[in-house]
Amino acid sequence: MRAVNFCAGPCTLPQSVLEEAQAEFVDYAGTGMSLIEMSHRSPEYDAVHNETLELVRSLFAVPDEFEVLFLQGGATLQFAMVPLNLLAGGGSAGYVVSGSWGKKALEDAAYHGDVHTAWSGSDSGFTRMPAGDEVEIRPEWQYLHVTSNETIHGIRMVDWPDADIPLVGDMSSDYLSRPIPWERFDAIYGGAQKNLGPAGLAIVFVRRSVLAETNRDLAAYLRWDIHADKNSLYNTPPVFAIYMMGKTLKWIQAQGGLAAMEAAAGARADLIYGAIDDSDGYYRSPVDPAARSLMNVVFRLPDEDSEARFISEAKAHQLLSLKGHRSVGGIRASLYNAMPMSGVEALASFMDSFR
Amino acid sequence: MRAVNFCAGPCTLPQSVLEEAQAEFVDYAGTGMSLIEMSHRSPEYDAVHNETLELVRSLFAVPDEFEVLFLQGGATLQFAMVPLNLLAGGGSAGYVVSGSWGKKALEDAAYHGDVHTAWSGSDSGFTRMPAGDEVEIRPEWQYLHVTSNETIHGIRMVDWPDADIPLVGDMSSDYLSRPIPWERFDAIYGGAQKNLGPAGLAIVFVRRSVLAETNRDLAAYLRWDIHADKNSLYNTPPVFAIYMMGKTLKWIQAQGGLAAMEAAAGARADLIYGAIDDSDGYYRSPVDPAARSLMNVVFRLPDEDSEARFISEAKAHQLLSLKGHRSVGGIRASLYNAMPMSGVEALASFMDSFR
C-alpha cells in the first residue's frame, strides 16, 4: 500500500514517475546500460539534460534575461555562493531573517561579504513575515535577500518587500507552486527535493546582466558564470537527480503546469487549515494567518503527549512524517506538488476523527 | 543485450546492483514509498547512510584518525575546499601538475591560497609521473597535492613523492582499486562516479588532527569540520547516490574487497596493454610504461581515420565509449571496478581482429 508522505523534503514524488524510472532503470532506451552508467557527454544524457533545462524554462516561465543552472550542494551551498559571486567588489547586502533558513543564509553570507539584518522575526518567534514597509532598505545594498517560505516555521512571504534594490531569493520550498515576479529578482535559488525531484540538485536562476559582473576570483565550481557558460556541464552533473526532475516536470506539465500546481497547492492547504480552524481550538496554528505557508502547514495540539499520540496513530493509517522539525516540535504536514488530494483528504479526515 | 561500457565516468556499475535497486525502487522495504522520497532523518535512510559510511571505513581500511565525509560537488568542489580549509592562516602549499586534473586543482587553489607548482609534466605532454626526487618540496608548505591517476592522460602515480610534508590527494579514479598509504596523507578526496557508484557524490577523508585546525571563517557547506561533526548530514545529502554506493560497496565486499579489486584491476589492464604491446606497433601507448594507468588505458592507432573507424566498429560490437577525451583524442578504455573481465576480453579480441 502506497504511504501518504508528508515529509518536508526529500518528499513524495508522483507514483507514475517512480514507476517509469523503475521500468527503464537497468536498460535505458535499449542502450544496454542504465542512464546512471552513461557519460554525461553522451547523446542520451545530453538529450535528458537539455530537455530538463527547457522544461524548467517553460514551466517556470523564465525570461530570456535569466540563465538556469543545475548545481550540487543544495540551497546550503548557495548561502556561500550568493555573497561569493555578488559581493566580491566589497559591496554590501541586506537579509530578511524570517526564520531558520533566512538566519542561516545571513550567518553564512557574513563570512563572505558585508551583510546586514534588514528585518528579523525572531522577537515574534518567526511566526510572521514583515509588512513591506517594515524592512530596512539601504540604497547602497547590492541586493535584499529573502526566503519565500520558511519550511520549519510554516510561514511564507505573500507580498515581496518594497525595495528599490534587486531581490535575491531562496525559494526551495516554493518552486513551481507560485509564480515568480522575475522583474524583482537578480537571482533565485533552491533545492529540487521538495516540489521537483529527489535530493542532490539545486536550481539557480541568475540574471545575465548580473553574471557579467560576478566575481571571477574564485575556484571554478563556486563561479556562477562558469556553470552558465558550460550549460551546467562544467563538471559531472548529478545525472540521476536531473533525470528524475525532468520526469517530474513532465508530470507537472501534464497536470496543467504552474497554474494547476498553484491551484492545487491552495486547495490542499485550505483543507488542512480548515480542519485546524474548525476544531474549536483543539488544533492551533501558531502563525500569523496572513503568512500561512501553503507548503508546510504547522500546528499544535493541546499538549505534547497528544502530539506524540497523533503522530503515532497517523502512522498506523499510513500518514507519515508528520512530526514537526526538531527545533520547534509540534506537527508539520508538508504538501508539495506531488502530494495527491486524496492524501490531504485522508489527513483532514484523520484530524477530525482523532479529535 | 548488456553493453560493455568503457566510459571514464559516470561508468559501468555491477548489473546485480542495478537489478536490486530496480526491484526496490518504488516501494523500499515495504514502507510504501521510494527511498528517494524519504526524509534524510528517517530510520530507513539513517540505516543506509551509516551502513555505507561503515562499508567505506572497512573496505578502504580507514584508520580511526580519519573522518569520512560524503559531500556534493564532486572532486571539483574540493579543488576549492582543500585550500579554503587548509590554507586559511596564510599558509602555502605545493601542487604536482601531472595532467589536466592536477592543473585544475592548482589553478583553482590559487584563488584561495598561496600555492606553487612542485613539478609539472607539461613539457612531456603529461605522459609520465615525476620520480620521487624530481618534486620540489619546501618545508614551509602545509601540504603537497598529488593526483594519483590522471584520467585523461592515462597515467598513474605508482610511487608517492618523497616528502617530509603531508600529502593531499585527488584519488577519484583510483578509489578502492589500490591501497592508500594513510600515514602519508592529511586529506584525500574523489568522486564516487568511477569505481564506487553513480554521479553526485564525493568522498573526502580528513585526518582528525587536521580538522581541529581547519578554517572556521567560511560558510557552513565549505567547512569540512561541520560535515564531520554532523556525520555528513548537515544538510540534505545526495540520498540516491549514497544508497547506490552502499550497494556497490557490498558487491565489492562480496568479490573479496580491496585486494580482489586490486588484483582484478591489474589483470584487466595487463590484457589491454598486452594487446597494445603485441600489436607490432599498430596500437601505441603514448605514456611512460612505468606510469601506465590501470584505470584508463589510452592508446593511439596509426592515424585518426583508423581511430574513428575503430570506435565505430567497436560500437557495433556493443563495446562503447572508447573515444579518448576531446582534449587529447585517440582511444581510451576505462576499466573500473565494475568492468567484467569478459568485457575486457571482448575488447582485446576486437583489437586483435580489427588490426
Image: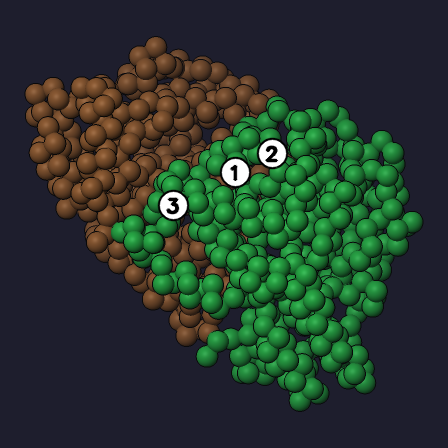
Chain colours: A green, B brown
Q: What element carries label 1?
A: loop
Image coordinates of residue B160 in percent, x first then y, are 31, 25
- Label 3 or label 2, whichever comes before in sequence order: 3
Q: Do labels 3 and 2 share a chain?
A: yes
Q: Which of B250 and A336 is in front in this view?
A: A336
A16 or A214, nearer to the observer: A16
User: Which chain is mark 1 on?
Assistant: A
- Answer yes or no: are tags 1 and 3 on the same subunit: yes
Q: How far apart are marks 3 and 2 (CA)?
A: 26 Å
Q: For label 2, count other residues whose C-alpha is less than 10 Å away and answer few (under 14), some (14-19) or many (20+).
A: many
Question: Between tags 1 and 2, which lies in front?
Answer: 1
- Name which of mark 1 and mark 3 comes first in the sequence: 3
Does B48 sit above or below residue B137?
below
Callout 2 amino acid: Trp
Mark 2 highlights which residue? A224
Residue identifier under label 1? A232
The residue tagged 3 is A44
Taking the spot 82% from the left edge, 34% from the top edge, the residue there is: A141
